[in-house]
Image (spheres, rainbow, N blue to C red):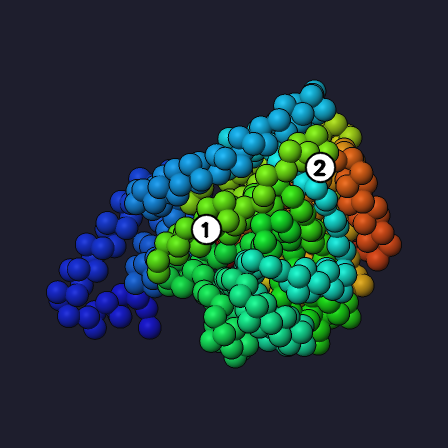
Amino acid sequence: MSNFSLAALLPGWVEIIFFIYWTFTIVLLIMDDREPSITLAWLFVLVLLPLIGVVFYIFFGRDWKVVAQRKGWIQTLKRVETEEMSPIYQRNAGATGRFAREWAGTIALPVSRAITSENVSTVLPAASVELFVTGKAKFARLKQDLAGAQRFIHLQYFIWEQDRLTAEIVPILLDRLEAGVEVRIMYDWMGCITFKKRELKQLAHAGAIVRADVTDLLRINYRNHRKIVVIDGEIGYTGGMNVGQEYIDGGERFATWRDTHLRITGQSVAGLEKLFGSRWFEHKKDHEDLFTQKYMPAPDPTAVEAGTLVEIAAQGVEDPWSATRRAHMVAIGQAEESVWIQSPYFVPDYSIYDVMINAALSGIDVRFMMTGVPDKRLPFFAAQTYYRKLIEAGGKVYLYKAGFFHSKTIVVDGVISAVGTMNMDQRSLKLHKELMCWVFDEGFARQGADAFLADMENCHEVTLDDVLAAGRLKRFRNQAARLLSNVL
């Protein structure tokens, strides 16, 4: 039954209200500052499928960047962040000068500026930076840190499962709660919708504050994909791993699971706590303020000169410049020797895709690595439509075959690098809340490059012959999947 026959079944007054709303929606769509191709695509949907099209537009098409700016809460949050983070930045102001001296004339400076200009942030010193390339190592260390917590534990994950790993973590959290430690947990509502909540309810009953994030159905397309742990304001974690046994051993679906995470300590932890505190503050329930010094790193007069310099790039759909994506574009576009990127998915927007091709054409060693054992078929099919141009430009594409590949990293010129939550797909690049922790340290970049080289041992390099060998039916399937790139 068509949309027009459905409309005929509606009472006359309902049709009038719907027509007014439909017209209003089209006017707003035209007035939004979007790419013309996106605007035209949605206009086509709204005109061709007036009833279903409006429903799809409400859930998947509204430009929340514009909506958020109209409502003014972004400005309020930025003001709170600026005021509350000022003491942290002031006492570590020397790190900015040291960064400018040590990295003068290098790619690090424009990358940092791209982050700072939007994120109300600055370079901060880390007492230590530790890289994890297996879930076993990461969660072993995390459980030790959780067990040693004395004041508070803040946990934010896209996915929180209920399995063997959580059965080990929950008793630790219950013990800390009994000892008087504050525990706050935030999980993405849609990301966890299929998982049981018995253990989370148990923690809430014991005194933890547990919140499901992004429960507003009108924002269902805009998830919180960040992974953040902050313990006592002194220890922080971020990267690709969620809370679940599969991130250690691959679970029931995969032979192995390859992922990357990092642990930072010292003043730089404030960058992660700021993001946790910001989202907690945004929550509609009570606007609890976690920006007080109680939740921030204690002053350390030796940190500025001795620490590893890092900066957290973060973005959400409401941010005007998308600092996480923008930092990648600046880094790729200004690389002088090499750009090595890892992501489970490859459905990029045209801006970042073009800058990768430009780098490859100019002789930069551009390597992209993604999973060759997919968890989702449609993104895997769509990714294959992006291989040809990148390879023809001189770039290299690698498919990881040993198991599922979930790492999100970038190493540029072998001297700076980042680890975080942002995938190279349009959901991460434009829709989700994401973060990347940029580390301005050659030694750490070498660790990332070494991990990349080790991963290559388990990869198949996609050749132009591989791409051209695909039959017409397969190419049609892949191109059809690409049409859904905004929702993959």
Q: Are marks 2 and 1 in contact (CB under 8 Å)?
A: no
Residue 290 on image: x %, y %: 45, 51
Q: Is residue 199 above or below residue 76?
A: below
267 vs 275, nearest the viewer = 267
250 vs 306, nearest the viewer = 306
Residue 384 on image: x %, y %: 67, 53
| Residue at image location 17% in from the left, 60% down from the top | 17
| Residue at image location 77% in from the left, 61% down from the top | 137
Task: Name the mark on residue 357.
Answer: none
Q: Which residue is mark 2?
A: 308
Instruction: Determine if residue 484 is in view.
Output: no
Disc 1 is placed on an element classified as loop
> In the picture, residue 390 is in which quadrant?
top right
Residue 419 on image: x %, y %: 67, 47
Label 1: few (<14), some or many (≥20) within 10 Å?
Answer: some
Identity, as a three-letter code, of the amino acid under mark 2: Thr
User: Most extreme residue toward the left, as rendered?
Assistant: 13
Camera-nearest label, 2 or 1: 1
| Residue at image location 19% in from the left, 54% down from the top | 20
Kindly report the distance in space between the C-alpha atoms of the residues bearing marks 2 and 1: 25 Å
Q: Quadrant of the C terminus?
A: bottom right
Disc 2 is placed on an element classified as strand
Instruction: Determine if residue 58 is in view.
Output: yes
Label total for image: 2
Q: Which residue is mark 1?
A: 290
Identity, as a three-letter code, of the amino acid under mark 1: Leu
| Residue at image location 30% in from the left, 45% down from the top | 71
Residue 393 on image: x %, y %: 73, 36
